[in-house]
Amino acid sequence: MARQSPCSASLLIACPDARGIVAAVSGFIAEHGGNLLASDQHTDLQHGEFFMRANFELHDCDLDRSSFDVAWKPLANRFNMNWHVHWSEDIKRMAIMVGKQAHCLQDLIWRCKAGELNVQIPMIISNHKTLESIATDAGIEFYHCPIEDGEKEVQQNKIKSIINKANIDLVVLARYMQILSPEFLDGFEDRIINIHHSFLPAFAGGDPYRQAYDRGVKIIGATSHYVTDDLDDGPIITQEVVDVSHRDSVDDLRRKGRDLERTVLARAVRYHVQDKILVSQNKTVVFE
Protein backbone atom coordinates (compact mmCIF):
# COMPACT_ATOMS: atom_id res chain seq x y z
CA MET A 1 0.00 0.00 0.00
CA ALA A 2 1.33 3.44 -0.91
CA ARG A 3 2.27 5.62 2.01
CA GLN A 4 -0.09 8.57 2.50
CA SER A 5 1.51 11.94 3.15
CA PRO A 6 0.02 14.58 5.42
CA CYS A 7 -1.83 17.25 3.45
CA SER A 8 0.47 20.05 4.58
CA ALA A 9 3.45 20.96 6.72
CA SER A 10 4.54 24.07 8.56
CA LEU A 11 8.20 25.01 8.66
CA LEU A 12 9.29 27.39 11.44
CA ILE A 13 12.67 29.07 11.16
CA ALA A 14 14.78 31.34 13.37
CA CYS A 15 18.28 32.41 12.33
CA PRO A 16 20.64 35.38 11.94
CA ASP A 17 19.27 37.81 9.40
CA ALA A 18 20.80 37.47 5.92
CA ARG A 19 19.95 38.15 2.30
CA GLY A 20 18.24 35.47 0.27
CA ILE A 21 16.57 33.40 3.01
CA VAL A 22 13.01 33.79 1.72
CA ALA A 23 14.07 32.96 -1.83
CA ALA A 24 16.05 29.94 -0.66
CA VAL A 25 13.17 28.55 1.41
CA SER A 26 10.59 29.13 -1.33
CA GLY A 27 12.93 27.62 -3.91
CA PHE A 28 13.52 24.54 -1.76
CA ILE A 29 9.79 23.91 -1.38
CA ALA A 30 9.15 24.38 -5.12
CA GLU A 31 12.14 22.20 -6.06
CA HIS A 32 10.65 19.30 -4.13
CA GLY A 33 7.14 19.68 -5.53
CA GLY A 34 5.59 21.43 -2.57
CA ASN A 35 2.98 24.12 -3.07
CA LEU A 36 3.53 27.15 -0.83
CA LEU A 37 0.19 27.95 0.83
CA ALA A 38 1.28 30.74 3.15
CA SER A 39 4.50 32.47 4.07
CA ASP A 40 5.19 35.07 6.74
CA GLN A 41 8.44 36.49 8.03
CA HIS A 42 9.77 39.03 10.50
CA THR A 43 13.18 40.64 10.98
CA ASP A 44 14.21 41.87 14.42
CA LEU A 45 16.58 44.64 13.36
CA GLN A 46 17.76 45.35 16.90
CA HIS A 47 19.00 41.80 17.46
CA GLY A 48 19.70 40.88 13.83
CA GLU A 49 17.33 37.91 13.93
CA PHE A 50 15.12 36.56 11.17
CA PHE A 51 11.94 34.53 11.71
CA MET A 52 9.81 32.74 9.15
CA ARG A 53 6.82 30.42 8.92
CA ALA A 54 6.16 28.61 5.66
CA ASN A 55 3.08 26.43 5.28
CA PHE A 56 3.12 24.21 2.21
CA GLU A 57 0.94 21.56 0.60
CA LEU A 58 2.38 18.08 0.20
CA HIS A 59 0.12 16.57 -2.45
CA ASP A 60 2.86 16.41 -5.10
CA CYS A 61 5.82 16.86 -2.74
CA ASP A 62 8.58 14.24 -2.79
CA LEU A 63 9.41 14.85 0.90
CA ASP A 64 7.84 13.34 4.02
CA ARG A 65 8.79 13.07 7.70
CA SER A 66 11.36 10.36 6.95
CA SER A 67 13.20 12.27 4.22
CA PHE A 68 12.71 15.95 5.02
CA ASP A 69 15.57 16.36 7.51
CA VAL A 70 18.27 15.05 5.19
CA ALA A 71 17.12 17.18 2.28
CA TRP A 72 16.67 20.33 4.36
CA LYS A 73 19.83 20.31 6.50
CA PRO A 74 22.27 21.70 3.88
CA LEU A 75 20.14 24.84 3.48
CA ALA A 76 19.55 25.08 7.24
CA ASN A 77 23.29 24.82 7.91
CA ARG A 78 24.02 27.44 5.25
CA PHE A 79 21.95 30.04 7.13
CA ASN A 80 22.65 28.71 10.66
CA MET A 81 18.96 28.04 11.24
CA ASN A 82 17.09 26.79 14.25
CA TRP A 83 14.06 25.13 12.75
CA HIS A 84 11.13 22.77 13.27
CA VAL A 85 8.75 21.17 10.80
CA HIS A 86 5.23 20.16 11.86
CA TRP A 87 3.00 17.81 9.88
CA SER A 88 -0.71 18.60 9.77
CA GLU A 89 -1.67 14.97 10.37
CA ASP A 90 -0.11 15.16 13.86
CA ILE A 91 -2.86 16.31 16.21
CA LYS A 92 -1.35 17.63 19.43
CA ARG A 93 -2.30 16.06 22.76
CA MET A 94 -3.08 18.64 25.45
CA ALA A 95 -3.26 18.10 29.20
CA ILE A 96 -5.21 20.71 31.16
CA MET A 97 -4.30 21.46 34.77
CA VAL A 98 -6.94 23.24 36.84
CA GLY A 99 -7.72 24.37 40.36
CA LYS A 100 -11.25 25.23 41.50
CA GLN A 101 -12.33 27.75 38.84
CA ALA A 102 -14.15 26.28 35.86
CA HIS A 103 -14.49 29.04 33.27
CA CYS A 104 -11.26 28.49 31.30
CA LEU A 105 -11.58 24.70 31.44
CA GLN A 106 -15.17 24.73 30.20
CA ASP A 107 -14.29 27.14 27.41
CA LEU A 108 -11.40 24.99 26.13
CA ILE A 109 -13.53 21.83 26.19
CA TRP A 110 -16.34 23.59 24.32
CA ARG A 111 -13.99 24.97 21.67
CA CYS A 112 -12.47 21.54 21.10
CA LYS A 113 -15.88 19.91 20.73
CA ALA A 114 -16.99 22.72 18.40
CA GLY A 115 -13.94 22.19 16.19
CA GLU A 116 -12.39 25.58 16.97
CA LEU A 117 -9.26 23.98 18.45
CA ASN A 118 -7.67 21.11 16.54
CA VAL A 119 -6.30 19.35 19.60
CA GLN A 120 -6.98 16.26 21.72
CA ILE A 121 -7.62 16.49 25.48
CA PRO A 122 -6.81 13.07 26.93
CA MET A 123 -6.66 14.26 30.53
CA ILE A 124 -7.54 16.91 33.08
CA ILE A 125 -5.38 17.14 36.22
CA SER A 126 -6.22 18.97 39.43
CA ASN A 127 -5.13 19.26 43.03
CA HIS A 128 -8.85 19.46 43.91
CA LYS A 129 -11.90 17.37 43.06
CA THR A 130 -14.09 20.42 42.49
CA LEU A 131 -14.16 20.17 38.68
CA GLU A 132 -14.17 16.39 38.31
CA SER A 133 -17.78 16.35 37.10
CA ILE A 134 -16.89 18.60 34.17
CA ALA A 135 -14.27 16.10 33.03
CA THR A 136 -16.68 13.19 33.53
CA ASP A 137 -19.44 14.88 31.52
CA ALA A 138 -16.97 15.55 28.71
CA GLY A 139 -15.67 11.96 28.72
CA ILE A 140 -12.15 13.06 29.67
CA GLU A 141 -9.95 11.22 32.16
CA PHE A 142 -9.65 13.13 35.44
CA TYR A 143 -6.62 12.80 37.71
CA HIS A 144 -6.93 14.07 41.28
CA CYS A 145 -3.42 14.83 42.52
CA PRO A 146 -3.64 16.64 45.87
CA ILE A 147 -0.68 18.10 47.72
CA GLU A 148 -0.53 15.86 50.78
CA ASP A 149 1.34 16.88 53.95
CA GLY A 150 2.89 19.81 52.08
CA GLU A 151 4.81 17.42 49.80
CA LYS A 152 4.53 19.54 46.67
CA GLU A 153 7.58 17.94 45.04
CA VAL A 154 6.04 14.48 45.37
CA GLN A 155 2.79 15.74 43.86
CA GLN A 156 4.52 17.41 40.92
CA ASN A 157 6.62 14.31 40.23
CA LYS A 158 3.41 12.28 40.11
CA ILE A 159 1.80 14.71 37.69
CA LYS A 160 4.82 14.81 35.44
CA SER A 161 4.92 11.02 35.34
CA ILE A 162 1.25 10.92 34.30
CA ILE A 163 1.88 13.50 31.58
CA ASN A 164 4.98 11.79 30.21
CA LYS A 165 3.31 8.38 30.03
CA ALA A 166 0.47 9.88 27.98
CA ASN A 167 2.82 11.45 25.39
CA ILE A 168 1.45 14.93 26.02
CA ASP A 169 2.60 17.67 23.63
CA LEU A 170 1.20 20.69 25.45
CA VAL A 171 0.22 21.49 29.04
CA VAL A 172 -2.29 24.27 29.70
CA LEU A 173 -2.67 25.84 33.13
CA ALA A 174 -6.33 26.86 33.09
CA ARG A 175 -6.23 28.75 36.40
CA TYR A 176 -4.21 26.02 38.12
CA MET A 177 -2.94 28.56 40.69
CA GLN A 178 0.17 26.63 41.73
CA ILE A 179 3.82 27.43 41.00
CA LEU A 180 5.57 24.71 39.03
CA SER A 181 9.10 23.77 40.02
CA PRO A 182 12.11 24.05 37.68
CA GLU A 183 12.31 20.23 37.78
CA PHE A 184 8.74 19.99 36.51
CA LEU A 185 9.41 22.51 33.75
CA ASP A 186 12.55 20.72 32.55
CA GLY A 187 11.84 19.19 29.15
CA PHE A 188 8.68 21.26 28.64
CA GLU A 189 10.27 24.52 27.49
CA ASP A 190 7.75 26.55 25.43
CA ARG A 191 5.16 23.80 25.88
CA ILE A 192 3.36 24.95 29.05
CA ILE A 193 0.87 27.79 28.58
CA ASN A 194 -0.53 29.78 31.50
CA ILE A 195 -3.34 32.31 31.74
CA HIS A 196 -2.63 35.14 34.16
CA HIS A 197 -5.49 37.35 35.26
CA SER A 198 -3.62 40.60 34.73
CA PHE A 199 -2.10 42.66 31.92
CA LEU A 200 1.48 41.64 32.65
CA PRO A 201 3.93 42.93 33.74
CA ALA A 202 1.44 44.84 35.91
CA PHE A 203 0.09 43.08 39.00
CA ALA A 204 2.02 39.82 38.86
CA GLY A 205 1.49 37.24 41.58
CA GLY A 206 -1.64 36.61 43.61
CA ASP A 207 -5.01 38.45 43.60
CA PRO A 208 -4.26 40.91 40.78
CA TYR A 209 -7.89 42.12 40.57
CA ARG A 210 -7.69 43.31 44.16
CA GLN A 211 -4.38 44.98 43.34
CA ALA A 212 -5.93 46.64 40.29
CA TYR A 213 -8.93 47.85 42.30
CA ASP A 214 -6.70 49.29 45.03
CA ARG A 215 -4.60 51.06 42.41
CA GLY A 216 -7.66 52.56 40.71
CA VAL A 217 -6.74 51.45 37.19
CA LYS A 218 -8.99 52.27 34.24
CA ILE A 219 -8.27 49.08 32.29
CA ILE A 220 -7.72 45.49 33.37
CA GLY A 221 -6.32 42.70 31.26
CA ALA A 222 -5.41 39.07 30.87
CA THR A 223 -2.15 37.59 29.63
CA SER A 224 -1.34 34.17 28.24
CA HIS A 225 2.32 33.23 28.30
CA TYR A 226 4.72 30.32 28.28
CA VAL A 227 5.77 29.22 31.75
CA THR A 228 9.39 29.61 32.85
CA ASP A 229 11.28 29.48 36.15
CA ASP A 230 10.49 33.17 36.69
CA LEU A 231 6.97 33.62 38.05
CA ASP A 232 4.62 35.28 35.52
CA ASP A 233 7.61 36.39 33.44
CA GLY A 234 7.66 33.88 30.57
CA PRO A 235 7.36 34.86 26.89
CA ILE A 236 3.98 36.53 26.33
CA ILE A 237 1.84 34.99 23.59
CA THR A 238 -1.23 37.23 23.62
CA GLN A 239 -3.02 39.80 25.78
CA GLU A 240 -6.30 41.69 25.90
CA VAL A 241 -7.79 44.51 27.98
CA VAL A 242 -11.21 45.89 28.91
CA ASP A 243 -12.20 49.28 30.31
CA VAL A 244 -13.19 49.59 33.97
CA SER A 245 -14.21 52.57 36.09
CA HIS A 246 -14.46 53.80 39.67
CA ARG A 247 -17.95 52.27 39.79
CA ASP A 248 -16.61 48.72 39.39
CA SER A 249 -16.14 46.64 42.52
CA VAL A 250 -13.51 43.94 42.89
CA ASP A 251 -16.18 41.38 41.96
CA ASP A 252 -17.00 43.40 38.83
CA LEU A 253 -13.33 43.31 37.86
CA ARG A 254 -13.22 39.57 38.39
CA ARG A 255 -16.37 39.06 36.29
CA LYS A 256 -15.01 41.16 33.43
CA GLY A 257 -11.64 39.46 33.82
CA ARG A 258 -13.08 35.97 33.45
CA ASP A 259 -14.39 36.89 29.99
CA LEU A 260 -10.92 38.05 29.00
CA GLU A 261 -9.20 35.01 30.47
CA ARG A 262 -11.30 32.61 28.39
CA THR A 263 -10.68 34.30 25.07
CA VAL A 264 -7.01 35.09 25.67
CA LEU A 265 -6.15 31.54 26.75
CA ALA A 266 -8.04 29.97 23.85
CA ARG A 267 -6.27 32.27 21.38
CA ALA A 268 -2.85 31.35 22.77
CA VAL A 269 -3.64 27.63 22.59
CA ARG A 270 -4.86 28.03 19.00
CA TYR A 271 -1.65 29.82 17.96
CA HIS A 272 0.41 27.06 19.57
CA VAL A 273 -1.43 24.09 18.07
CA GLN A 274 -1.36 25.77 14.65
CA ASP A 275 2.44 26.10 14.98
CA LYS A 276 2.44 29.87 14.65
CA ILE A 277 4.80 30.82 17.50
CA LEU A 278 8.56 31.25 17.68
CA VAL A 279 10.37 32.24 20.90
CA SER A 280 13.51 34.36 21.22
CA GLN A 281 14.90 36.86 23.74
CA ASN A 282 12.09 35.92 26.17
CA LYS A 283 9.62 37.24 23.57
CA THR A 284 7.39 35.56 21.05
CA VAL A 285 6.96 36.09 17.34
CA VAL A 286 3.37 35.12 16.58
CA PHE A 287 2.40 34.67 12.94
CA GLU A 288 -1.32 35.40 13.32
Image (tube, grey):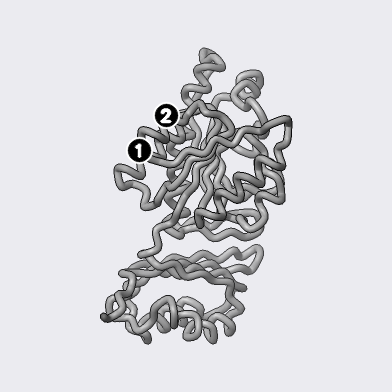
Q: Earlier in the sequence, mark 2 or mark 1?
A: 1
Q: In this view, does 149 lie above or below 157?
A: above
Q: Is 111 on the left or on the right of 17, as rendered? A: left
Residue picked out by circle 2: 133
Which sits in the foreground, 125 or 210? 125
Q: How crowded is mark 2: few (under 14 residues within 10 Å), some or many (20 or more)?
A: few
Q: Can residue 247 be seen in this view?
A: yes
Q: What residue type is labelled 2?
A: Ser
Q: Is residue 198 visible?
A: no
Give the residue displayed 63% in from the left and 58% down from the top: 187
Which sits in the foreground, 20 or 104? 104
Residue 135 screen position, x and y as percent: 42, 35
Q: How crowded is mark 1: few (under 14 residues within 10 Å), some or many (20 or more)?
A: some
Give the residue displayed 68% in from the left and 31% down from the top: 148
Q: Which amino acid does label 1 sit on?
A: Trp
Residue picked out by circle 1: 110
Which sits in the foreground, 52 or 166? 166
Q: Where, quadrant-wise, is the N terminus in this rendering?
A: bottom left
Q: Do the residues labelled 2 and 1 touch (CB within 8 Å)?
A: no
Give the CA distance from mark 2 to mark 1: 15 Å
Give the residue displayed 58% in from the left and 55% down from the top: 190
Residue 85 screen position, x and y as percent: 47, 70
Kindly identify which numbered label has been placed on residue 275: none
